[in-house]
Amino acid sequence: MSRAVNLRRVTGLGRVGRLRGLARRRPRVDLSHPARSPLGSSVVNCVTYRDGHRLSVPGDAAEAVKRVRASGEGFVWLGLHEPTSREFAGIAELFDLHPLAVEDTVEAHQRPKLERYGETLFAVFKTVCYVEHEELTATSEVVDTGEIMVFVGEDFVVTVRHGRHGSLGPLREGLEADPARLAQGPSTVLHAVADQVVDDYLRVVDSVQGDMDQVETEVFAEHGARVDPGRIYQLKRELLELKRAVVPLGRPLEELATRPNRVVAPDIQAYFRDVADHLQRATDQIAAFDELINSILQAHLARVTVAQNEDMRKITAWAAIVAVPTMVCGVYGMNFDHMPELHWRYGYGMVVGVISVACLVLYRAFRRSGWL
């Protein structure tokens, strides 16, 4: 039983004719021009390349694949944005994609990974984007994530993008401007996608550095104890989101750079090693940020504790000063008939003077000790 038959039984995918119907119902959109790629809808763009040059091939994706396989030269690049299972059914059957990979592609929310299904590579990349904000608050979104799935075969590349960012249009234009590089085959597209994703990691890391510096400066400022701790926790949560996107990609890139594979040209593997080096830099910076944010949080809690201790010392000092007149007045408020100073002419002045001197002495003593 062929894999295509199994695919139809497991996922209920339709025939290739559905892909032709999809092409008739939906206008063809060129992803090399991102302004004409409407977000929120499934966008299918099929381009054929031969010797690094883009060909104008009439017909739909099935026809393009048929022509490439008949000639034995070139490859087809098919790009989609958030397809449904019904929209992806014909494509999965056309390229004989594994049901598990198809399910991961449609459902999304996958970890970065690299899997082999026969002669097809399936790679998942988490894309990240820095969300601009005027001021970091306890609810600010700092990092927005998406996904790019890439199927790579000997004569085809299928890219599926999820999320509001990470458009592959500029990437396609850059590759088409370098035919010698694009002529190396589908693995060139896989490397270009990985390189763009990792470059975005580095840009986001550099932007997050600004938020880290801002929080650190405010915590160690004169009134750092008044900083809202929710801002620090929010930044830590966003760092965790960035970490989940970046760190797991290390192993797939290492595998692409070191393990032989029919789909990945040997010359391209050296470029994957360069991408892996850039990823390691982003990973190291995120690890440093994680340690720094923990230190900032601990420093903030320590400053809050110190501020509370200072407040308690001030309260205690003033309570001690107030205790002097309270005690003296309490003695003379007992209303006994026989008290020595009750009928003394200068008794009131003396008591007030003693209270004032005692309070002044205590005040100066507390000021010298730093309690006031």
Image (cartoon, rainbow, N blue to C red):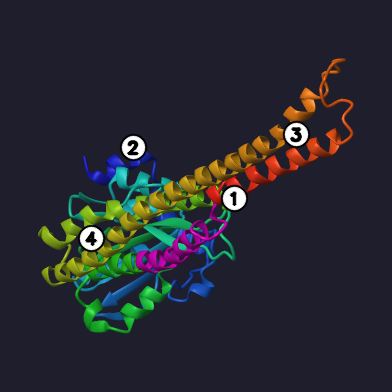
Please say whether residue 277 is visible from this viewpoint.
yes
Residue 10's disc number: 2
Q: Name the residue located 37 percent from the left edge and 57 percent from the top edge.
A: 289
Q: Secondary structure at mark 1?
A: helix
Q: CA distance from mark 2 to mark 1?
A: 81 Å
**Badge 1 vs badge 3, beta-carbon distance below 8 Å:** no
- Neighbor class of circle 4 (other Cα within 10 Å; few <14, some 14-19, many 20+) is many
Q: Amino acid at mark 1?
A: Arg
- Tag in front: 4 or 3: 3
Quadrant location, the N terminus: top left
Q: Name the residue located 10 percent from the left edge and 60 percent from the top edge.
A: 260
Q: CA distance from mark 4 to mark 3?
A: 91 Å
- Neighbor class of circle 2 (other Cα within 10 Å; few <14, some 14-19, many 20+) is few
Q: Secondary structure at mark 2?
A: helix
Point out the stretch of residues depicted in magenta.
200-226
The tag earlier along the polypeptide, 3 or 2, is 2
Front-lying residue, 204 or 75: 204
Q: Amino acid at mark 3?
A: Pro
Q: Amino acid at mark 4?
A: Gly
- The answer to which image quadrant residue 191 occupies is bottom left
Based on the picture, tell me whether residue 69 belongs to the magenta stretch: no
The tag earlier along the polypeptide, 1 or 4, is 4
Q: Position of residue 236 (x, y in %)?
A: 44, 50
What kind of secondary structure does the magenta stretch mostly adopt?
helix
Q: Amino acid at mark 2?
A: Val
Q: Which residue is mark 4?
A: 153
Based on the picture, tell me whether residue 214 belongs to the magenta stretch: yes
Residue 308's disc number: none
Q: Name the residue located 42 percent from the left edge and 73 percent from the top edge.
A: 169
